Image: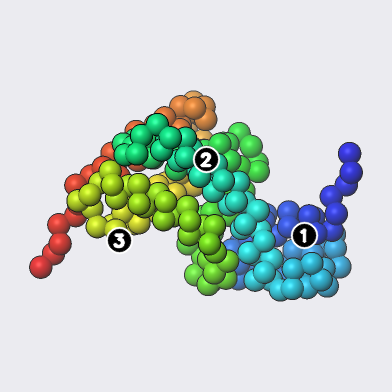
């Protein structure tokens, strides 16, 4: 089996360190040291630390986005107005598939997604582009049809929440299994999440405070 090239080794090291320490807590030197690469490798292969962050994020997020598109396409081929549970499954299912609790890579993906959601550094989120926007808009449009009484801003808040809940669960199950409780299988956890998140997405619209 061929050994990873320098670019791949830098990506692997950066994914691990960004997930563990955040964007600002990770230096280029730490990345290249872990990768066993020359300090100039980041500039040579990516141009900058920010572009490396973008490459790491896209490598993790693109397979999830592709699977979300495919599942939504499959649902829409059956009905033009899918229910909330089907939409939640289409959005959340690929997250569980790409972040298995019994896999170290899945845990890193979960932590990296949490970094993207919570890191104060703008570079952790500024990498998003048309592909990510397309997924967001497709699901928001479908949820808007299923939940016509909920404002777009609140729908986006809820959709972000489904992402955060899933990522937190995957990290927690991998790192700190609940004492005296057997770990849920991926299928069990996915079903529980879909039930819980369907209820959250389906909640009545929040009343406006006057």
Q: Residues within 10 Å of mark 2 (few under 14, many from 20)?
A: some
Residue in the picture at 31% in, 39% down:
81
The disc, 3 or 1, on the residue closer to the chain's N-terminal end is 1
Instruction: Please give left or right for residue 27 compared with residue 7 in the image.
Output: left
Residue in the picture at 47% in, 35% down:
74
From the top left corner, tell me how far across and down residue 22 is, in percent. Answer: 59, 63
Residue closest to the eye, 5 or 115:
5
| Displayed quadrant of residue 51 | bottom right
Quadrant in the picture for the C terminus: bottom left
Quick check: 84 above or below 27?
A: above
Question: Would you name the residue on which mark 1 appears?
Answer: 10
From the top left corner, tell me how far across and down residue 84 is, in percent. Answer: 32, 39
For label 1, the SS is helix
Q: Is residue 193 visible?
A: no
Residue in the picture at 36% in, 52% down:
140
Q: Residues within 10 Å of mark 1 (few under 14, many from 20)?
A: many
Instruction: Please give left or right for residue 174 compared with residue 151 in the image.
Output: right
Cα–Cα span, label 3 and label 1: 37 Å
Q: Residues within 10 Å of mark 3 (few under 14, many from 20)?
A: few
Question: Would you name the residue on which mark 3 appears?
Answer: 153
Q: Are the residues flagged by discs 1 and 2 in contact, CB closer than 8 Å? A: no
The disc, 3 or 2, on the residue closer to the chain's N-terminal end is 2
Instruction: Please give left or right for residue 115 compared with residue 31 in the image.
Output: left
> Closer to the camera: disc 3 or disc 2?
2
Residue closest to the eye, 99 or 21:
99
The disc, 1 or 2, on the residue closer to the chain's N-terminal end is 1
Question: Would you name the residue on which mark 2 appears?
Answer: 70
Quick check: 60 above or below 183?
A: below
């Amino acid at each position: 089996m061929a050994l990873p090239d320098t670019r791949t080794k830098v990506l692997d090291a950066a994914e691990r360190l960004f997930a563990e320490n955040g964007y600002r807590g990770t230096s280029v030197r730490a990345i290249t040291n872990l990768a066993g690469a020359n300090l100039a490798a980041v500039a040579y292969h990516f141009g900058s630390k920010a572009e490396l962050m973008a490459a790491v994020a896209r490598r993790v997020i693109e397979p999830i986005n592709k699977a979300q598109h495919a599942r939504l396409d499959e649902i829409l081929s059956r009905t033009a107005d899918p229910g909330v549970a089907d939409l939640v499954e289409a959005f959340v299912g690929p997250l569980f598939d790409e972040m298995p609790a019994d896999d170290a890579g899945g845990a890193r993906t979960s932590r990296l997604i949490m970094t993207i959601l919570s890191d104060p550094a703008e570079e952790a989120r500024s990498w998003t582009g048309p592909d990510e926007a397309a997924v967001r808009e497709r699901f928001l449009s479908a949820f808007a049809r299923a939940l016509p009484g909920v404002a777009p801003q609140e729908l986006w808040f809820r959709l972000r929440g489904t992402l955060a809940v899933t990522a937190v669960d995957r990290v927690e199950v991998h790192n700190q299994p609940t004492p005296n409780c057997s770990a849920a299988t991926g299928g069990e956890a996915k079903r529980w999440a879909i039930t819980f998140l369907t209820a959250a997405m389906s909640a009545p619209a929040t009343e406006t405070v006057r």
